[in-house]
Image: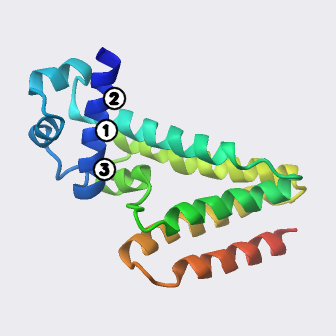
Amino acid sequence: MSSRMRDYILEAAGDLFSRQGFNSTSVDNIAAQAQVAKVTLYKYFKSKELLIIEYLREQDAKLWKKLAASSQQENALAELESLVQQLLDVIADQDFKGFASLNAEVEFPQHDNPVNQTAKEFSRQLREQIASLATRAGIKQAEVLALQLALVIEGTSITGRQQQGNPSIQHAHSLVQTLIKSAQ
């Protein structure tokens, strides 16, 4: 039962975080959304900061699990292209409200803040995943390509969210193909 309550509070908080932002969402808002007393919320999460960190970890884990489930291709280059395609498809979804970690990194810009440090893990993992696939595909400057593709993905996630219906996704697809081709 306690695991379900914890998950329920996380879900309620996540809904508010994605709609209102992290800093604009108070503990009172979260407790009201989850229909629990603040003492119950604090039983599962000792602070709002720890709740945010857990939410970020959960969102990142869900995304990576989803991507891993459908990324098996015939070779590393095809897997790399598939990974980037899937990420751009996530961004193109009309319900996309941004990657939670990137949103948190903007709201918590202090480098020593635990939320900021947790949020940066998404970008680090993204670059590592791309670099690993690029290395396996025989791309000599895999780290450079990883940074370039991460910039495209992260930039598109922000641009696409701010300007619904714009051609940023199409341009991102084109740019990704150009970057991968030129790196080979």
Q: Amino acid at mark 3?
A: Phe
Q: How many angstroms separate mark 1 from mark 2 (CA)?
A: 6 Å
Residue 118 image position (x, y, % from top left): 43, 39
Which residue is under mark 3?
108
**Side (left or right) of 90 relative to 179:** left
Residue drawn where x is 86% and y is 49% of the image? 136
Quadrant of the rendering where the C terminus is positioned = bottom right
Asked if marks 1 and 2 touch (Cβ < 8 Å), the reply is: yes
Numbered badge on residue 7: 2
Which residue is under mark 1?
11
For label 3, count other residues whose C-alpha is less than 10 Å away and answer few (under 14), some (14-19) or many (20+): some
Q: Nearer the viewer, residue 89 or 149?
A: 89
Residue drawn where x is 61% and y is 76% of the image? 172
Examine the rendered structure and indicate whether residue 111 appears above or below residue 180.
Answer: above
Residue 30 image position (x, y, % from top left): 17, 39
Q: Quadrant of residue 47?
A: top left
Residue drawn where x is 73% and y is 63% of the image? 145
For label 1, count other residues whose C-alpha is less than 10 Å away and answer few (under 14), some (14-19) or many (20+): some
Q: How many angstroms separate mark 3 from mark 2 (CA)?
A: 24 Å
Q: Amino acid at mark 1?
A: Glu
Examine the rendered structure and indicate whether residue 103 appears above or below residue 12.
Answer: below
For label 2, count other residues whose C-alpha is less than 10 Å away and answer few (under 14), some (14-19) or many (20+): some
Asked if marks 1 and 3 touch (Cβ < 8 Å), the reply is: no
Examine the rendered structure and indicate whether residue 55 appears above or below residue 101.
Answer: above
Residue 34 image position (x, y, % from top left): 18, 35
